[in-house]
Amino acid sequence: MNILLLGPPGAGNGTQGALLAERLGIPKFATGDLLRDAVKRGTPVGLKARAVMESGGLVNDDIIMGVVRDELAKPEAAKGVIFDGVVRTVPQAEGVTKLLGERNRKMDCVLFFD
């Protein structure tokens, strides 16, 4: 099951995402966590992200989608994921839809926290 959580900071999506991930036994993808992990591991996408982050810029959609692509390829993501804060722009939404489609998957549920 693939679930997208949307909402402003402090609305509870991170807390509920962690609970859902634990209950369903699937990973939670949070943009910041994914980027920090990719940078720490020194992946090709992480190196691109590091350069942007160190210059004080915002990481672009191509880098975000690269990190998501890498994470979706991991075996632990095969049963689904919780997307928390990953989709913040229309191009990111289109990118996630495409990445899931490449794996014959779809977004099963979208929850908005207010």
Image (cartoon, grey):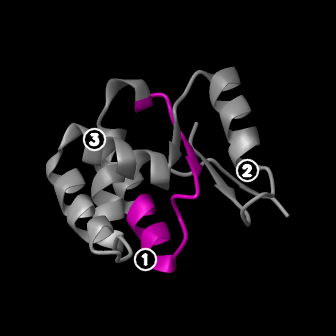
Q: Circle 2 — which element?
A: helix
- C-alpha gap between disc 1 and disc 2: 21 Å
| Residue at the image point whose x is 59% and y is 21% from the top | 25
Q: Nearer the viewer, residue 68 or 102?
A: 68
Q: Residues within 10 Å of mark 2 (few under 14, many from 20)?
A: many
Q: Residues within 10 Å of mark 3 (few under 14, many from 20)?
A: few
**Label 1 amino acid?**
Pro
Q: Circle 3 — which element?
A: helix
Q: Which residue is mark 1?
A: 91
x, y percentage for residue 44?
14, 51
Q: Circle 1 — which element?
A: helix
- C-alpha gap between disc 1 and disc 3: 26 Å
x, y percentage for residue 17?
68, 40
Q: Which residue is mark 3?
A: 40
Q: Which residue is mark 2?
A: 13
The part of the image, by quadrant, that contains residue 61 is bottom left
| Residue at the image point whose x is 43% and y is 77% from the top | 91
Q: Earlier in the sequence, mark 3 or mark 2?
A: 2
| Residue at the image point whose x is 18% and y is 45% from the top | 43
The range drawn in magenta is: 77-97
Residues at discs 1 and 2 in contact (Cβ within 8 Å): no
Above or below 96: residue 91: below
**Label 2 amino acid?**
Asn
Residue 78 in the magenta stretch? The answer is yes
**Label 3 amino acid?**
Lys
Residue 69 in the magenta stretch? The answer is no
Q: Quadrant of the C terminus?
A: bottom right
